[in-house]
Image (cartoon, helix red, strand yellow):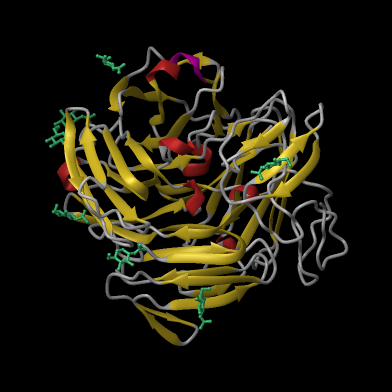
Amino acid sequence: MAVVVGCTLCVMAYISFSSAALCPDKTKWNYPVFWIGLPGNYGCEIYSANGRSTKANAVLECPYTTDRVYEPLTMFGHEINQESLTIATRMPASTGKSFHGCLVQSDNPISVVAINKYDGLIEGSQFRELKELGTEYYIMTANSNISSKPEFAIMAPFAGTKVSVRLPLVRPISVNYGGTTYTTGDWINDTLKDFQTMRIVTNKIDLTGSYVVSDKPVAVVAGDYETKVPIGGTVVSGHVEESMPPVQELGRDYIVAPLIHENYTCSLRILAVSNVTDVTGVTISNITDTVGFAVSIPFNEVYDYDFNCELQLIRANQDIMVGLFTQTGGIVGGKPAYFVLTPLEKAGNVAWFSVPDYHGLNLYFEHNYVNIIVKASDAGGIRVKNSRITSQFHQDIDVGGENYSAYSVRVWAFSIEAQWIHHTSGGKFVCYFEARYNDWRTYGYTLIPYQQGPDFLFWNADDHVATAKNITYNSNFNVKKFEATSNRQAKPFDASTNVVLTNTNRVVA
Ligand SMILES: *[C@@H]1O[C@H](CO)[C@@H](O)[C@H](O)[C@H]1NC(C)=O
Ligand SMILES: *[C@@H]1O[C@H](CO)[C@@H](O)[C@H](O)[C@H]1NC(C)=O
Ligand SMILES: *[C@@H]1O[C@H](CO)[C@@H](O)[C@H](O)[C@H]1NC(C)=O
Ligand SMILES: *[C@@H]1O[C@H](CO)[C@@H](O)[C@H](O)[C@H]1NC(C)=O
Ligand SMILES: *[C@@H]1O[C@H](CO)[C@@H](O)[C@H](O)[C@H]1NC(C)=O
Ligand SMILES: *[C@@H]1O[C@H](CO)[C@@H](O)[C@H](O)[C@H]1NC(C)=O
Ligand SMILES: *[C@@H]1O[C@H](CO)[C@@H](O)[C@H](O)[C@H]1NC(C)=O
């Protein structure tokens, strides 16, 4: 299984480095996490949270940035680590390739968030583990009312990754990449070295619906490099960014729960990743209007919908991608936050994260919440740092005859302890972190929920196929045998046979 390509110094189980790469000399890191250096003129904060009760030995590396970074990060059980990176690690704000990929590796499962910060103007994104990355993505950039510099970036963990980007099929597009101008529906094809990033940045051109396909797993982040929003009489700029889910993480049913948003404005973007042309193709309803309304969305089109931030249900007859943009300050606007929503079908049973504190942000955000969406019948089993949540504020919404509850649970910023959400008996949930300062400043990100289960592997290092596997365990849960199968499987762990079939690559010990 452990195949090392190119770099003979590396003894890594899953990652190959080209011989030109700086070879990390650690052996056998089990939980690698990749993230993309965010663009911008300011330093970036990285918060890592240890998901286990034992010590995590982790390392952050940005081997090719001007300031070559190699930082050991040590976290005791359920602790967090904060790293401030210099501007030299940031991606340039223009279209093209650069070597700004960074890697976090760990011997425990950890979560990693990167945050842009400047005087309290903050936005962040949780990054996907290498084993959760895909080879097919759709892009969602910011909605046109706030958007100024729509952008996305692709990062290649593996050397010699062939990447093809198809620009949106549905609106006038013009992108200059490597001296050539590409327009609506054109393919931009390129090959990336490991740690290399490929960026597309535009001036007010909505890139939503761009399609990324690669021959090895890649990480993708999208958003807007410079949103412009009016705060009273002043226009304020800021970033919005989220990690894009690979297509196998999309679904049909989404609950939108912007619960702390009294006096907020909210907008949704719904991207059709296939034709949802049936008249009931997508139905949007909310807690006061369970009938809602229906829309059809042709393939690759985006449907924008402004609403009053009430609890919403979106159900489609095909997979869709849903982004939520929130702004504080009611009608005067405010710094937006961007969440790419997790469908109910992809809920998990454990998540952990850090709540950034004053030292990283220059500003102590007073209101920090985690929003947890769970079947009402499973809510009693949810614990946030071992506390029950059923006494917290929540709202219910009916999903096909089943009640789901959206809880808004206050959490406190703390420089050491990680936040930890789990369900006592495997009940599944989706969750979001959001923070608000006492004025118009706000930020947040989707928390990636994991499926708790035994350790196992998710891709074949020989061919870099990272999808579902048919995995057999021995009685100690060590992998006895595994085989690559199709891209989708759906069966839970079967303790009697020790055979795991999974439809998700989000699995941790
Ligand atoms: C932009 O704002 C206008 C006015 O508030 C609204 O009618 C429109 O739907 C918004 N567009 C998007 C894409 O949200
Ligand atoms: C670019 O990649 C796409 C998808 O792999 C392929 O269909 C297309 O033919 C390629 N174009 C060129 C010019 O190589
Ligand atoms: C919302 O706005 C109203 C009217 O301006 C104000 O009274 C109320 O305190 C605001 N609520 C919050 C949570 O800021
Ligand atoms: C969507 O429907 C249109 C019109 O029927 C058709 O031309 C197109 O090929 C379809 N696209 C996909 C991706 O199914
Ligand atoms: C949602 O709630 C508001 C009332 O708060 C209502 O005006 C609106 O029409 C409702 N329905 C949908 C589908 O948004
Ligand atoms: C959902 O919850 C509401 C309010 O708590 C209750 O009236 C309703 O009967 C519940 N529906 C189901 C299907 O459990
Ligand atoms: C997994 O392996 C078993 C035994 O070889 C086989 O019967 C089953 O069809 C496989 N499942 C998949 C999804 O490939």
Left or right, residue 462 beside residue 265:
right
Q: Tell me the residue at 65%/68% (across/down).
A: 66
Q: Position of residue 57 (x, y in %)?
A: 75, 39
Q: Tell me the residue at 44%/42% (across/down).
A: 445
Is residue 341 or residue 176 the one in the foreground? 341
Left or right, residue 458 beside residue 503:
right
Q: Is residue 399 above or below residue 122?
A: above
Q: Position of residue 347 (x, y in %)?
A: 48, 34
Identity of the residue furthest to the right in this view: 8
**Quadrant showing the C terminus:** top right
Q: Tell me the residue at 66%/64% (across/down).
A: 67
Q: Is residue 37 above or below residue 251?
A: below
Magenta-colored segment: predominant secondary structure: helix
Q: Is residue 459 above or below residue 369?
A: below
Ligand 4's quadrant is: bottom left
Left or right, residue 313 beside residue 506:
left
**Magenta-colored stretch includes residue 130:** no
**Magenta-colored stretch includes residue 382:** yes
Q: Which quarter of the picture shows residue 451?
A: top right
Query: Does any portion of residue 257 appear in the rendered image?
Result: yes
**In the rendered structure, which segment of residues is drawn in magenta?**
379-383
Is residue 164 or residue 26 the one in the foreground? 164
Q: Tell me the residue at 76%/64% (across/down).
A: 17
